[in-house]
């Protein structure tokens, strides 16, 4: 689905209504949505201003993450949320670091932020699975899913994963969830070193 079609649906706006706002015929909007004609560049800044969205969203097919980002922007416009505070959260990516994440006074905003983060994690997990066609570690991925499904609230799981992240330098040394984590990691690192394959 092209972005314009999704955005019009989200904003509950008919093609005729947008055509009137742009001073063009409804058929033009239909042609854009059906991908029979590209949206002329002169209309992209107008659409950007009208919806408060980056013009890149209108002409391309949208990913699930982009759809959530658009929903977030619409919520911001509708709810006018206020940032109550910022929380530090570890962000894994090109640079592994702690970042300040806003916490809004409207729970809908916090929910959409969590949904975006979950969608990004799912995408990264899928990419990790597809690194090679015949992934030799498929059984490991299956175990990870089983652990997440069955014992995600167990402290030992979180402590062990954090320890592995430190051991393989995915997490910087200075990032630690709790004071007793260092002691736990010292002990588990000895086991890792003794059984280093």
Image: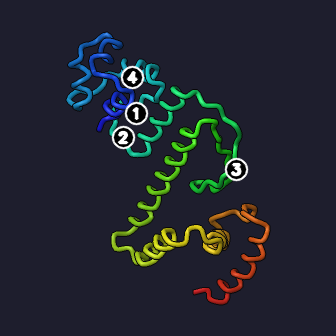
Identify the residue at image location x=44%, y=19%. Answer: 50
Q: Position of residue 70 (x, y in %)?
A: 45, 35
Residue 32 in the figure: left or right of residue 148: left
Identify the residue at image location x=53%, y=39%. Answer: 108
- Residue holding disc 4: 44
- Residue holding disc 2: 62
User: In whole angstroms, how far apart are the C-alphas of marks 1 and 3?
Assistant: 29 Å
Q: CB atoms at circles 4 and 3 under 8 Å apart?
A: no
Graded by Cα atoms within 10 Å as few (under 14), some (14 to 19) or many (20 or more), the crowding at tag 1 reads: many
Residue 88 in the figure: left or right of residue 23: right
First in sequence: mark 2 vs mark 3? 2
Q: Secondary structure at mark 4?
A: helix
- Residue holding disc 1: 57
Q: Position of residue 105 (x, y in %)?
A: 64, 36
Graded by Cα atoms within 10 Å as few (under 14), some (14 to 19) or many (20 or more), the crowding at tag 4 reads: some
Residue extending furthest bottom? 194
Graded by Cα atoms within 10 Å as few (under 14), some (14 to 19) or many (20 or more), the crowding at tag 3 reads: few
Q: Nearer the viewer, mark 2 or mark 3?
A: 3
- Residue holding disc 3: 88
Q: Secondary structure at mark 3?
A: strand
Q: CB atoms at circles 2 and 3 under 8 Å apart?
A: no
């Amino acid at each position: 689905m092209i972005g314009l079609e999704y955005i019009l649906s989200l904003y509950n706006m008919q093609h005729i209504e947008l055509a009137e706002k742009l001073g063009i015929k409804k058929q033009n909007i239909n042609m854009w949505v059906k991908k029979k004609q590209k949206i002329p560049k002169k209309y992209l800044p107008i659409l950007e201003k009208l919806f408060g969205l980056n013009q890149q969203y209108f002409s391309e097919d949208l990913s699930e993450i982009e759809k959530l980002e658009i929903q977030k922007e619409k919520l911001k416009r509708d709810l006018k949320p206020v940032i109550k505070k910022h929380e530090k959260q570890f962000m894994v990516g090109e640079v592994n670091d702690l970042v300040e994440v806003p916490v809004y006074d409207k729970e809908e905003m916090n929910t959409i932020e969590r949904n975006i983060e979950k969608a990004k994690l799912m995408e990264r997990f899928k990419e990790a699975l597809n690194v090679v066609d015949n992934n030799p570690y498929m059984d490991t991925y299956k175990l990870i899913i089983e652990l997440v499904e069955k014992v995600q609230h167990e402290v030992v799981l979180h402590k062990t994963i954090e320890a592995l992240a430190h051991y393989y330098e995915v997490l910087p040394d200075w990032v630690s969830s709790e004071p007793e984590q260092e002691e736990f990691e010292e002990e588990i690192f000895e086991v890792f070193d003794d059984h280093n394959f």
